[in-house]
Image (spheres, rainbow, N blue to C red):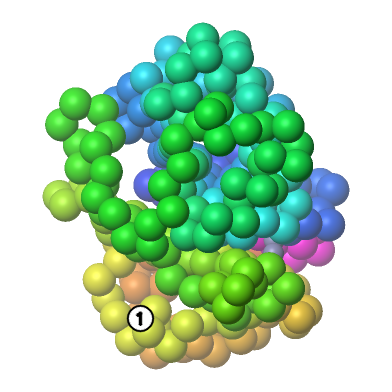
Amino acid sequence: MRMEKKSILSFVGNGDGFATKRSNTCAYLEAGKDLIVIDCGFDAFAKLRDVGLFDGKANVHFFITHLHCDHAGSLAVAVSYLYHKVFDGCASHIRVHFPNASIVDFLKAQGVGEDEYYFNINRWDEIEIGDDYKLEYIFEENDHDDNLSVNGISGTWSVELVSTGRYNIYYGGDSAGVKDRITRTRIYDEIYHEVCSVKTQGHTSYEELKDAFSHFTRSERARIWLMHMDDDFDEQQAVDDGFNVTTTV
Ligand SMILES: [Zn+2]
Ligand SMILES: [Zn+2]
């Protein structure tokens, strides 16, 4: 029986694109009356709505790591729902953060025009959350899938969320291995990393992850939260090795 520890981010799903026992990995954080969502895969909208996360919110921020369907597959319906049903046609409450304009075409192809949300293309920015809350974010290129690049600009990203005095989080997205930089720093309160049972192209195997963090002490390893797992992933082994495994609401 493992002790449940609470992570800073919560999850409505923590599976990979083919998992059927888990839902698509989708993280969220409630900050006052604002909601921050990281990735919005093909079954995420229903989960976010059913849990009631859109109810009573002042603004909803979407940070998207890339446009694979298990990461952005229900973004269009989520934006459309918020625009028409929650914010009464007021796009400024719906903020989509992604450092590549391809997401605008991606949404447009699904009938969601640029007038239905506020688009922020920056790789780095500081944004206001609620009344007294500043959030700095940084997108960094990943090596996950070159097919998503547009005009030489990467289409796959990790994202860091930093709010001074509150948290400093690294969210890896799909990352094709662990970035060296992440293994050499201790600045993050929590690292969220994708992992799978066996190596597949563009993803990180458990063996790779374990190896990359082998120099971390057990308490340092406890700050690493695993996500984007396949249905066969051996959670107990990861816990026995000192990692934390995300759970879903
Ligand atoms: Zn994925
Ligand atoms: Zn992917």
- For mark 1, does the 10 Å Cα neighbourhood hold few (<14), some (14 to 19), or many (20 or more) residues? few
Picture residue at 54% right of the left edge, 73% below the top: 153
Residue occupying the point 76% across, 62% down: 230
Q: Dominant secondary structure of the magenta stretch?
A: loop
Q: Position of residue 245 (x, y in %)?
A: 56, 58
Picture quadrant where residue 202 is located: bottom right
Vertical side of 196 occupied by 199: above or below: below
Q: Can residue 47 be seen in the rendering of this structure?
A: no
- Identify which residue, 169 or 62, lies in the foreground: 62
Give the structural element (helix, strand or loop) at label 1.
Answer: loop
The verdict on residue 233 being magenta is yes
Query: Is residue 19 a member of the stretch shown in magenta?
Result: no
Quarter of the displayed picture in which ligand 2 can be seen: bottom right
Please provide percent x and percent y for residue 41. Answer: 69, 45
**Above or below 219: residue 207:** below
Which residue range is magenta in the image? 227-234
Amino acid on which the number 1 mark rests in the picture: Thr
Residue highlighted by disc 1:
217
Residue drawn at 25 percent across, 71 percent down:
187
Rendered position, 190 above or below 133: below
* Quadrant hosting residue 156: bottom right
46 vs 57, left or right, is right
Q: Is mark 1 within 8 Å of ligand 1?
A: no
